[in-house]
Amino acid sequence: MCGVLTDALSTVLREPVQLTVAGRTDAGVHATGQVAHADLPASLDTAWLVRRLARLLPPDVRVRTVTAVPDAFDARFSALRRHYRYRVATAPSGAEPLRARDTLSWPFPVDVEAMNAASVRLLGEHDFAAFCKRREGATTVRELQRLVWSVDDAAVVTAEVSADAFCHSMVRSLVGALLDVGRARRTVDWPASLLSRGERASEVPVAPAHGLALVGVDYPSDEELEARAAVTRNVRTTAT
């Protein structure tokens, strides 16, 4: 998405544009609430730009709004938290055809109560290295603020996941581990027990990318943007 949108903006404005996004999602992950920033001319007609991009972008990429922000705003580092949603169809027939692109077909019944009990044990600030693909120089310490599972009448189980930030494959690994709890392959205590590992746990399954979507990003008030970015740029470690 970032590359496609960068190319489109550069074409429209007839000059190179550098784009910064709030969340760098894994390949195949969807986003309905992505936020990005770029330095554009102050005189630009933002409504015109939205219409122009709608004609130029492919059908699966859309810019809903373009808004002027303070100089201190940074789509990535100013963010307070990101919100993700993972959809799982547990009906024997699989995902509904119109939702097959954003919903995992999971041919096993799951115990949502057990999954929620295991999820509660993961909340808070921890080193989530066991659930992340490590990147050189990047911390895996994150504050997981929300992880709740629900089920609707169509047997679609949905995870709502929020954190101040996520490391590579973290949400998909959490989902994979908790689905194993849901189908009774693992105990309720197992996912939280992995937090002491300090390294990637090979036994944690990574859920497929297409069931995941970035659905929102929260930011502080304009007056707090610069301070928030400074906090985010600090490399965190867990207390010893």
Image (tube, rainbow, N blue to C red):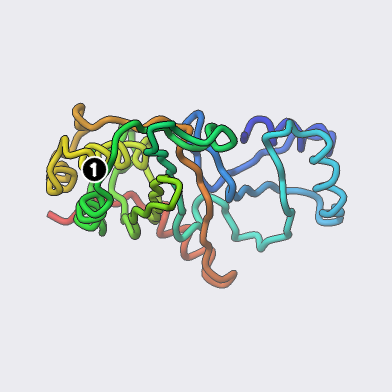
Tell me: 193 left or right of 235: left
Percent across and percent down for residue 95 are: 47, 35
What residue did someone put label 1 on? 182
Quadrant of image for the N terminus: top right
Residues 187 and 14: in front is 187
How many callouts does the rendering have? Answer: 1
Percent across and percent down for residue 6 are: 69, 35
Tell me: 55 left or right of 211: right
Dot 1: element: helix
Q: Residue at x 50, y 43 (%)?
A: 213
Residues 28 and 157: in front is 157
Percent across and percent down for residue 191 are: 18, 44
Percent across and percent down for residue 179 are: 27, 39
Q: Quadrant of residue 182?
A: top left
Tell me: 119 left or right of 209: left
Alpha-carbon neighbours of circle 1 within 10 Å: few (<14), some, or many (≥20)? Answer: many
